[in-house]
Amino acid sequence: MTGQFRVGAAGQDGRWGPGRGLGPRDFTRIARNGFGDALNSYPHSMGWFRDRLIVGTTRSNLCLFKVSKIAKKLDRWPVKCPERVYDQDMRAQIWSFDPAAARPGVENAGWSLVSQAPWIDAEGEQLPRELGYRGMCVFKGASDAHDHLYVATYTPARGQGTRILRSADGAQFDEIPMPAGFDRSIITLRLLVPFKGRLFTSPTGTAGGNPNIAGNAIVYASSDPAGGNWELVNTPGFGDRENLGVFEMAACGDYLYAGTGNGRGYQIWRTRAEGRAPYDWERVIVNGAWRGALNQGVASFAAHDGLLYAGSGIQHGGIDRVNRIGPAGPELIRIYEDGQWDLVVGYQRDTPEGMKIPLSGFAPGFDNPFNGYFWQMESHDGWLYLGTFDWSVMLRYSERTNWPQPFTAMLDRYGMENFIAMRGGAELYRSRDGENWLPVTTQGFGNPYNYGIRTLQSTPHGLAAGFVNPFGPFVGVDLEDGRFDYVPNPDGGLEIWLGSQRNPAS
Amino acid sequence: MTDTTPPSGRKTKTKAKPKAKAKPRTKTGPKTEIKVEADQAPGPFPAPEPALRPAPVPDRAPLHADPVFILAAPRSFSSLVAAMIGQHPELYGMPELNLFQCDLIEEFNTGLTPAGTKKSPFWASMRHGLLRAVAQIHAGEQTPEAIRMAERWLKNRELMTSGEVFTELAEAVAPRRIVEKSPGVLRQRAYLDRMLETFPGAKFIHLVRHPIPQGQSVFKTKGGIGVLMALNSIDLRGEVAALEPQIAWYNAQVQILRFLDTLPDEQFVTLRGEAFLGDLETHLPELCRWLGISDAPEAIDEMRHPERSPYSCMGPANAPLGNDVNFLNSPELREDPIPIPPLDRPLPWRKDGEALHPRVQDLARALGY
C-alpha cells in the first residue's frame, strides 16, 4: 500500500464537490395569504430565535403607498383600498413558526400570531403604534441575561416615531430607550446589527414621503441597548452631505460595513469599531462602484466565505421619479478584506481602480431590467442566496404614455397577461463561490404577485424566504368584458417558503 | 509501476487467448522500438511526424496536482477505464473536456478554427463534457440552468487559453487530480503538445484495444461511422472506397507512441484494455501505486463503480453527452472475459476476406497482442 488514504472534500451526496444547493423542488410554502390575513403584505423582518422562525409584518403596503407623498405613475391602482387607509386594521404583527408543528399540505400550519401593535391615540385619532416591523436581530446586550430578540419598527407619520422593541421570549415585546437623534420625524429604521458586543443602528426614513431617506447618514451603537447608552459612532454623513442615509450594514471579518444612499451613487464605509467613538471609518467604495446614480443605494449586504457582497437598488421599486433615477437593474459587487473589489453582476466598465468585468457574466438585474433591487442576501449551508424585487406585475397598472415604443410594441405583441405570467414574480439566485450564479426561481415560485424577496433567514431547518406580496385581499384586473375591476385574489398576501433538501419533494 | 516488459516480440505465442495476468507496461526500451518508416507508410498509414522536445516547466508552483491523461483510440474502453480510475478518492474523473483541441476558449465556444473553418461536425456535442464539468464543479448539479451558468463561465473566459482554463479546473478540484480523456486530442500532434506544455508533470496512460474488436465496436456503436468518416479512416485502395477502422486505430497508436516517445519512462504507461479489465484485482492496485495514490481496498472498491461518477449518465437536455453515449447509458463495470482474436483472421467487416494490414498487425504485436 502506498501513501496515505486521502479523501477530498465530500459533498452532501458523498461525492466530491459542493452540495448542489437548494433548487426549486427543495422549497415548500409554509405560509401563504399573509398567514390567512392578506393585509400582511411584507415579511419585513425575520429571525431565528429560541427554535422558532419569527416574522414581523408590514400591512397593506400598496394602500400606504397610495396615500404617501411618494411620486408615482400608476393610472390604475393595483389593489382595492379603503377611502381612509386606517379604516382597515393596519396594526403590524409578529408571527412565530414552530417547525415541529408544521403539517404538510395544511396551509399556515405551525404559525401563531404572537404579537400585534397596540392602538395609540394621536391627537384624537386612533392609529396603530406600528405599521410594520422592518428589522430584526438576536443580540445579547450587557444587561441581558441571555439572547434577546430586537425588532425595528415602521410607524405612522403622525405617530410617536420609530422604536426598537426587545423581547426575551419572542412573544412579549417592550420598547427600549432610543438614541438621542431619533425624534418623531424618524418614522422607520431597518438596521439592527450586532458587532463586537455592540448593537448598531441607523435611522432609515422620515415622515413626508421619505421611508428610505433619513437625510443624514448617522450610526449609533450601544453595548447595552436595554439601558440606552447609545453613542453616535461616525461623523454625520461620513463627512459627505450627499450621503442621505445608511441603508444597510453588515459585519464581515474584522469590519462593520455601512452602505449609504447617495444621488451620485452609493458609498460603502467600514470600521473596526475600536477605540472611542466616533470610530475610524474607511471609505472602500465611492460613486456606486463607479456606476454612478444608477447604483443609488446599497440594498443588501451579506458576508460569504470571508467576502462582503453588496447588492444595489434604486428606491421605490427601481424607479426614483423625484430624482429621475432609473429604471435600471441592480448590480452586485464583492469586497475583499484588503479593500479591493470585484464586479460580480453588472456592466463592464473602466474605473479609476481598473477595468471591472462582471465575473458572473450577468448584466444588471441578472439580465432582467425588471429587477429593481437586489433586496436580500443570505449565506446558508455553503451557498450565497440572493433575492430580488421584480416589478414586472406593476406593468399592468402603469401609465403607458411614456413607454418606449419598442417596449409597447413588444407587450402588445406578446400580451400583458402572458408577459406577467412568464416574467412576473421575484427571483431567487444562488452561488457557491459568489461568481457563478444560477436561478432557484425567476417567477416568485409560480406566483407573479410574490414580487419581492425581502427576507432570507438561515435556520437549522433550512433557508426561509419571505416573499413580499401586497396584492390582496382584492386585486385589480382587466376583466373579459374590458372593464378594470377588483376581484378577490387567492394568491394575495405575503408568503414564506422554506428550502431544505430534507424536503420530501427534493 | 515497475513492470518493464518490452513492447514487442512476445505476443505471437498468446495472441489467440486473453492474458489473465498481462501487466501494465512502462516503456523502457530504446525509444525507436516502434518503427514506422516514413518510406513504408503509403496510403492510409501516413508517415509519423517528427518528435518535439519536451515542454518547458512553468515558473510558479502549481496549486494543483498534475492530471492523469488517458490516450486512446475511440472504442478502446477509455470511457469505462477513465471513469473507473476517476472514481479513486484522490482523483477526479472528468467527462471528455476537449479543451486542448483549442488554443483560446473563444475557439472552444465558436467551434471555429482561427482560420474560420469548422473544427468538427460534432463540435457542438463535444462541448457538452466541459459544460457538464463546470456545472457540476460550480453549481453542484447538472441541470439546464447550471449548464447555462457554465456557458456564462466559458463566455467570461473567451480570451483565456485552454491550458489556463484546464489549470483553473485542476485547481478547483484540488487536492484531487484530474483524470481525463478526450480522443479528439489525437487528431493533431499540436493538441498533445499543448497538454504537455500545460502540465509537464502529467501522467499519461496509453490504453489499447485489439484492432479487430475495436473496429467491430466502431461499426456497431451509434455514431461510429461518422467518427470514421471524420477521421478519414477510409481505404481507397480498391475500386470502391470503404470505411476501414484499422486506419484510425493505427493512426491513433502511432500518434500516441510518437508523443510518448518524448517522455521519460516513468511518465507514462501502456495498458492493454483486455488484460487490464480482465484482472482488476491485480492491475488496479498496480496502477494506483504507479500513480502514487492509495491502493487501499476501499479506494479500489470505489474504482469498480464507474457508474457512481456524476458524469456517468446522460446530462441535461442542453448538454446530454460529454462521453460515449453507449457508456452513458450503461456505465456499470462488467467483469466478463474479453476474447482476443488472432491478428491474422479475416476482418469481419470486409467482404474480400482480407486480414489486418501487415503494418497494423506488426504494431498490434508490438503493443502486446
Image (cartoon, coloured by chain):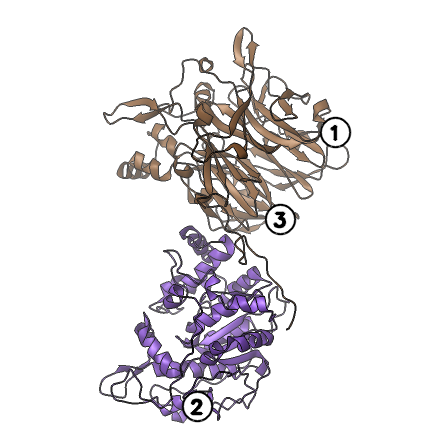
Chain colours: A brown, B purple
At x 37%, y 80%, the residue is B213
Q: For this view, does A70 lie left or right of residue B43?
A: right
Chain designation of label 3: A
Q: Nearer the viewer, residue A156 or A237?
A: A156
In the rendered structure, the answer to whether residue B163 lies left or right of residue B364 reads right
Whether label 1 touches label 3, CB < 8 Å: no
As drawn, B44 above or below A35 = below
Residue on which disc 2 sits = B36
- Looking at this view, name the residue that lies furthest to the top: A124
Q: Position of residue B21 (x, y in %)?
A: 51, 83
Dot 2: chain letter:
B
Q: Residues within 10 Å of mark 1 (few under 14, many from 20)?
A: some
> Please, which chain is the residue tagged with disc 1 on?
A
Residue A250 rendering spot, x and y as whole percentages? 62, 37
Amino acid type, label 3: Gln
On-image quarter of the N terminus of chain A: bottom right
**How far apart are the alpha carbons under marks 1 and 3?**
35 Å
Question: Please, what secondary structure does the residue beneath circle 3 have?
Answer: loop
The residue that label 1 is drawn on is A142
Q: Are marks 2 and 3 in contact (CB under 8 Å)?
A: no
Q: Which residue is mark 3?
A: A340
Mark 1 and mark 2: span between their CA atoms? 85 Å
Image position, residue A371 (x, y; %) = 44, 38
- Residue B136: x percent and y percent? 48, 57
A109 w.r.t. A118: above or below: below
Rendered residue at 40%/68% (across/down): B114
